[in-house]
Amino acid sequence: MIYPKLAVVGCGLIGSSVIRAARAAGAVRAVAVADASAAHREQIAALGYADLVTADVAEAVRDADLVVFAVPVQAMGPAAAAAAPALKPGATVTDVGSVKVSVAEALRTAIPASIHLVPGHPIAGTEQSGPASGFAELFRGRWVILTPDADETPAYQEAVARLSDFWTALGAQVDVMDAAHHDLVLAVTSHLPHLIAYNIVGTAADMEEVTQAEVMKYSAGGFRDFTRIAASDPTMWRDIFLANKDAVLEILGRFTEDLQALSRAIRWGEGDKLFELFSRTRDIRRGIIIAGQESAEPNFGRDRTAPPPGPAGS
Amino acid sequence: MIYPKLAVVGCGLIGSSVIRAARAAGAVRAVAVADASAAHREQIAALGYADLVTADVAEAVRDADLVVFAVPVQAMGPAAAAAAPALKPGATVTDVGSVKVSVAEALRTAIPASIHLVPGHPIAGTEQSGPASGFAELFRGRWVILTPDADETPAYQEAVARLSDFWTALGAQVDVMDAAHHDLVLAVTSHLPHLIAYNIVGTAADMEEVTQAEVMKYSAGGFRDFTRIAASDPTMWRDIFLANKDAVLEILGRFTEDLQALSRAIRWGEGDKLFELFSRTRDIRRGIIIAGQESAEPNFGRDRTAPPPGPAGS
Ligand SMILES: NC(=O)c1ccc[n+]([C@@H]2O[C@H](COP(=O)([O-])OP(=O)(O)OC[C@H]3O[C@@H](n4cnc5c(N)ncnc54)[C@H](OP(=O)(O)O)[C@@H]3O)[C@@H](O)[C@H]2O)c1
Ligand SMILES: NC(=O)c1ccc[n+]([C@@H]2O[C@H](COP(=O)([O-])OP(=O)(O)OC[C@H]3O[C@@H](n4cnc5c(N)ncnc54)[C@H](OP(=O)(O)O)[C@@H]3O)[C@@H](O)[C@H]2O)c1
């Protein structure tokens, strides 16, 4: 048991996965949940993981040793403001927001100095949302990035170490970095991929010469991969792009420059340039598989029902 | 049995899947394979599906009732030229090339008029290549597009119908369309997605402020999805972009325009515009799942080992 009482504010995909995983790991004794959605509160109560489910943020966080804010990024500040008067001095407050500079600032503004604020972000999720889509294994083998303050006091350092133990108990690996660096790294590994996926699916949907039915039927040629992340929650992603505007626009600028060079190579028939890029990119996937962040199965294992290949093996 | 003798020229992922599936369906009696790679010929022989494995294209196609060219797009013309003198009059020749206008033209130039030429393209594959990566179920539930000539003679029409039966026996569904329309549709559903994936992985690899190790560790935020198709065969994809240049550049132009609008919406904080696009794109994925071209499992089923969600279930 790492924290006697856990409070989760916003209990959708991520928040509910935190309470499931914390229960499974025996990392907490009591769990209180605040959520703005009546439908979600009902689902959470039915799951049976929480001792208290309420619409009242202050009620949920009272006496909690760890408070996890798991609402959309732009809702972090208001949720923290609602919690502030009821927070227990010496408690630890963290969040799971996908952007760190602006969220950390919003939390810091709302939360009293007597509280240990340690912003965080689990690099784990799916394209679904809501409490019914959560599961205890979501964080297993994934990374959680913490972006603590420069505060060197033993009490704060102890709070960071304990939060790190909490995530480790949930199956994750923990890294610590600067919030601004987090926002740049995630602009590359998450925000730009989502932007590109939303954009290509939008472009395909707006074609006149090619029907939507054709796009769907022939999507196995590559397009369907992009539709997964383009099916992610619109509120969550609107918030992320607005909250990490500078880093996203910076990375997008580089992507566009590279794309123009690629376009020019196609136009002028420069096969060698294409071949060189297409060979280089394979190594990154190999690295991701070696880093344990992806399965090596072809097609994401979509064809998993297929029998193993013949005697010459794969 | 649909064709007494099948010859496959170029027996990698697609060619070997054709022979596996044809054997499994009992659609052919004899199988001959020609492949330029000695290592692949050894693997194909070891698989035991072929009666003859040779480097000599003419030897393989002799007496064949169906010849399937499954080499990279730019190799189709030379391979067909090598086959031409040995083709049996009245035989059917098809291909599996990812581009149709230029490939059909190359085949038509090489192949005598006494042969029924019916170009084709199975919309199925994985990011792997070579004969060891093939499997009999690859075409099950997927679409095969045929782009036959306008030839109305009964003999030609019969050849098209028989080829269609062949693919149906292998588990696929068959559509017929114009080659130019095929090239535009596939530019949207396959070629642009690959171009974008190669490009984003290249952009990420070239970052100086973010290390490759960071890109790999935190790739579960979305990036890893793109690395799958960016790990596809460089020769195959170089050929495709060069052979379908016009359609690819046209679709890329629209994509870039849309991306600029999205970029501007982020810069000016136009949350409503972002929300509107991000809501619209979800429907396309739903359509693809309904069309049977994608599994509904979150995260492509990567978390499949997770137990089903609790009582409130999804
Ligand atoms: N999904 C991912 O893959 C992922 C991964 C890593 C981090 N994150 C971050 O995790 C956070 C939550 O994402 P999620 O996917 O779990 O979202 P979600 O499934 O939509 O859950 C969010 C929950 O918070 C509730 N809520 C919204 N505003 C609130 C407020 N002011 N007070 C109390 N409850 C409120 C929502 O209710 P309503 O539905 O009524 O709004 C919903 O039940 C976001 O900050 C996101 O950036 C997400
Ligand atoms: N992969 C997909 O997802 C997919 C999907 C639909 C359609 N296609 C199309 O299918 C075709 C084959 O793709 P694939 O993925 O099966 O490729 P692959 O696994 O690389 O197989 C191609 C085979 O053809 C051999 N070859 C190359 N040139 C040859 C020649 N002139 N004569 C005889 N053999 C030759 C290659 O040998 P070397 O290795 O020595 O070159 C290799 O063994 C391409 O036209 C592609 O556009 C691919």
Image: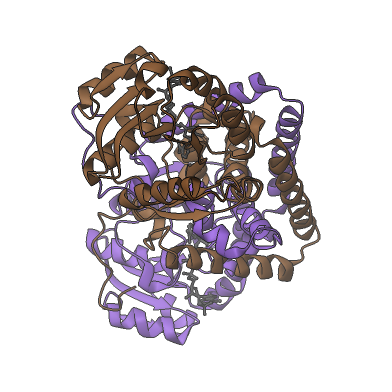
Chain colours: A brown, B purple
Can you tell which quarter of the image residue A49 is in?
top left
Can you tell which quarter of the image residue B257 is in?
top right
Foreground pick, B161 / B211: B211
- For image coordinates 40% across by 62% down, the residue present is A292
Q: Quadrant for the C terminus of chain A, please.
A: bottom left
Up-down relation of residue A123 to residue B283 (above or below): below
Q: Residue A308: image x %, image y %? A: 25, 66
Is residue A145 visible in the rendered image? The answer is: yes
Foreground pick, A256 / B272: B272
User: Left of A49 or right of it: where is A239?
Assistant: right
Up-down relation of residue A161 to residue A4 (above or below): below
Foreground pick, A285 / B184: A285
> Tag count in the figure?
0
Q: Residue B146: image x %, image y %? A: 48, 48
- For image coordinates 59% across by 23% down, the residue present is B275
Foreground pick, A64 / B24: A64
Can you tell which quarter of the image residue A87 is in?
top left
Is residue B62 visible in the rendered image? The answer is: no
Q: Residue A143: image x %, image y %? A: 44, 53
- For image coordinates 27% across by 60% down, the residue present is B27
Q: Quadrant for the N terminus of chain A, please.
A: top left
**Quadrant of picture, ligand 1:** top left
Up-down relation of residue A313 to residue A153 (above or below): below
Q: Residue B233: image x %, image y %? A: 54, 67
User: Left of A248 or right of it: where is B150?
Assistant: left
Up-down relation of residue B178 to residue A272 (above or below): above
